[in-house]
Image (cartoon, grey):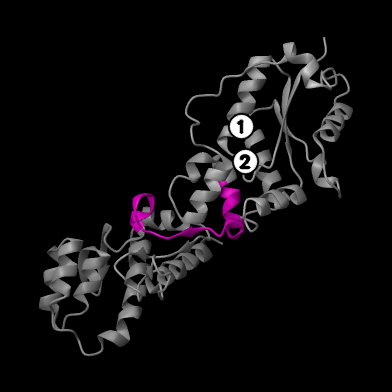
Amino acid sequence: MREKIVVMGGSFNPPTIAHQRLMLGAVETLGAARGIFVPSSHAYVSAKMRRDKHRNEVLPEEARLRMLLAMAADDPRLEVEDCEFHRAERSYTYESMEAVQEKYPEAELRQNPFLSGHLDRFSIIEAPAGLEGVSSSAVREKLREGLPGAEAMLHPAAWAILQEYAGAYKMKIEMFRGEYRFLSNFYEAPVEYRGLRYGSNEAAFQAQKCLTEEERREFTRLRPSDSKKRGSSVQLRPDWEEVKAGIMEELVRAKFTQNEELGRLLLATGKSELIEGNSWNDTFWGVNLKTGEGRNELGKALMKVRAELAARQV
């Protein structure tokens, strides 16, 4: 009896857990000996993304191949065939099937050249549960818009590889909320700064506006929102405008080096651009999301500290 092979072609830009689980489901249902992923060529994917008005959101062939191989490593029945990468001109499914057939001459592939004449040979495979909303386009959208949830749609090893190619999707984190709330100064995490221990970076930052240690000590007992309110009414130190950006950078560094888990989370943002997007027109520390204007000084400090943490790991 000839062995059965399941072939799944696609852009895989990027490959998701849905691709993996659908393939395994098909292999199990059909009793196939192997399942083969066949990624499309860079030329095809580029043309497709141009039609979709996202010409810059194309992972290199090398990246897609590595991510597929990482997923396939979970099960010995899964393989990756890169035959479409080696065609200079437009690639057709028939040619890819021919390439797979040539590689596995005993496999049952050529028996159905015309679908309409062999409908009795089709199998309806129920999609595995829990994959609603999981797709390559959903991953790209979340990365493009800086929304949480993209990582959960990818195999862990594939996600790690994707971080090396963050620029391919113009990856941005534009609001420090939800999954990325830890990036906000209002996130409650202990930080020691200049001899005092505060409950958040917001409290520590507002305290530095004060003239005396007695005033600063008051902020060690305040929650973030109360700290901001209190900080708006203190008598400012005369050099505040000159020193505030440097103080913020020092506090960001203290927060992510003193709290190991937060440092790990910061590193996990990869090469994403970190933007303190807001609707209250803070154009010094962040960016006004309506106008796109802002210096994003907090985002810059976060990215600088992230680069420092990454350098320590080398």
Tell me: 51 left or right of 247.
right
Residue 119 image offset from top left, x and y in percent: 74, 14
Circle 1 residue: 20
Tell whether label 1 touches label 2 (CB within 8 Å).
yes
Are there few (<14), some (14-19), or many (20+) residues within 10 Å of tag 1? many
- Picture disc at residue 15: 2
Above or below, 65 against 109 in this view is below
Given residues 176 and 115, the one toward you in this image is: 115
Residue 200 image offset from top left, x and y in percent: 24, 62
Q: Secondary structure at mark 2?
A: loop
Above or below, 107 against 52 in this view is above
Q: Secondary structure at mark 1?
A: helix
Q: Quadrant of the N terminus?
A: top right
In the rendered structure, which amino acid carries the disc numbered 2? Pro
* The quadrant where residue 291 appears: bottom left
Tell me: 13 left or right of 90.
left
Are there few (<14), some (14-19), or many (20+) residues within 10 Å of tag 2? many
Q: Main secondary structure of the magenta part?
A: helix
Tell me: 274 left or right of 285.
right
Q: Could you tell me which residue is drawn at 10 percent across and 77 percent down?
A: 214
Q: CA distance from mark 2 to mark 1?
A: 8 Å
| The stretch drawn in magenta includes residue 199 | no
- Picture disc at residue 173: none
Part of the protein shown in magenta: 159-182
Residue 187 image offset from top left, x and y in percent: 28, 58
In the rendered structure, which amino acid carries the disc numbered 1? Gln
The answer to whether one can see residue 59 in this image is no
| Of pointers 2 and 1, the one earlier in the residue sequence | 2
